Amino acid sequence: MRRWYGLDEVPPGWGRSVVTIGVFDGVHRGHQRIVKSTAELARERGLQSVVITFDPHPDEVVRPGTHPPLLCPPKRRAELLAGLGTDAVIVLPFTLELSRMGPDEFVQSVLVDRLHAAHVIVGENFRFGHKAKGDVALLGELGEKYDFTAEGVPLVANGDTISSSYIRERISAGDVEEAAHALGRPHRVEGVVVRGHQRGRALGFPTANLETLPHTAIPSDGVYAGRLVCDSERYPRSEWPTAISIGTNPTFDGQERTVEAHALDRDDLDLYGEHVALDFSARIRDTLRFDSVEALTEEMHRDVARAREIAGF
């Protein structure tokens, strides 16, 4: 499986392809269906299959400051797409120059000249070209001009219509279980572990405090059960059942919103500086302000017990 960043990395002599295009934020079950269909059709026709995605999100270039919360960062998105059976994933840098291309120019420079598209599969609401003037119907017309066929398909999986916007709404509401259903896996938040106030350690619950990646879709304030994932030289391919707290720590009059994770029964982990991920399984409770540290500690014991039960640990 090949991964390319930009059109210049497409090798000379690349043969005819079945191509799918989209932001694919989240690589949810609807996206997965489209990408798998692309790979299957390519195999049937004896062609190569290619997935085109974009970085940064087009909204950030076209309308700066409107970047939606991301369901997964570009590297993770490329990894997920690569795992769906396609021959190549190309991350196309979304620039002002690209945003100003007309539909015909985009099709010719990307689909025809570089990828030699024989067939293109997109979501039925796919838009492309300057000011999003292109739609599936125009893509089909351009296909007749440039010798490829095109089809728009609904983002549906097992009868469910799925959208990244809906998943963001569920995450914002703290409904990580419904988000996981639509994604086909738990929602993941990534970041680097940094030093916090170390209150958790003093209370007997050491936590990893995440400095999350920009634009990350973070669940609403509350306590969650999940898993802490790390793949580094110190902790290769490691994961631990985890209780996750998101909020401002109101019992301590905190002002800054934090994302902290306590790996169950592990007080020996040294994760400072490590890039880690948190996979969210279920919401345990809302963030609460307690009258005393003792009351908070008692509730934390209950939170850990509930996280352990959810994890089957």
Image: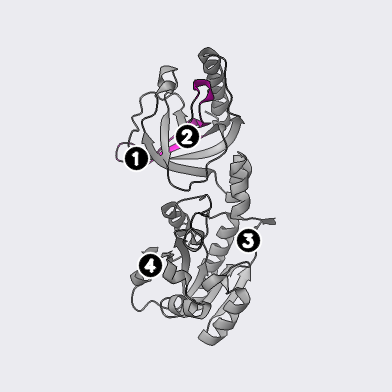
Query: Along the polypeptide, which appears first: circle 2 or circle 4?
Result: 4
The residue at which mark 4 appears reads as 6
The answer to whether mark 4 and mark 3 are in CB contact below 8 A is no
Give the Cα separation between the discs numbered 1 and 3.
Answer: 36 Å
Query: Along the polypeptide, which appears first: circle 3 or circle 2?
Result: 3
Number of other residues with Cα within 10 Å of mark 2, as a class: few under 14, some 14 to 19, many 20 or more: many
Q: Secondary structure at mark 2?
A: strand
Q: Secondary structure at mark 1?
A: loop
Query: Along the polypeptide, which appears first: circle 1 or circle 2?
Result: 1
Magenta-colored span: 226-253
Q: Position of residue 303 (x, y in %)?
A: 56, 24
Disc number at residue 155?
3
The answer to whether mark 3 and mark 2 are in CB contact below 8 A is no
Q: Position of residue 254 (x, y in %)?
A: 48, 26
Q: Is residue 250 magenta?
A: yes
Q: Nearer the viewer, mark 4 or mark 3?
A: 4
The residue at which mark 1 appears reads as 236
Q: Nearer the viewer, mark 1 or mark 3?
A: 3
Give the Cα separation between the discs numbered 2 and 4.
Answer: 34 Å
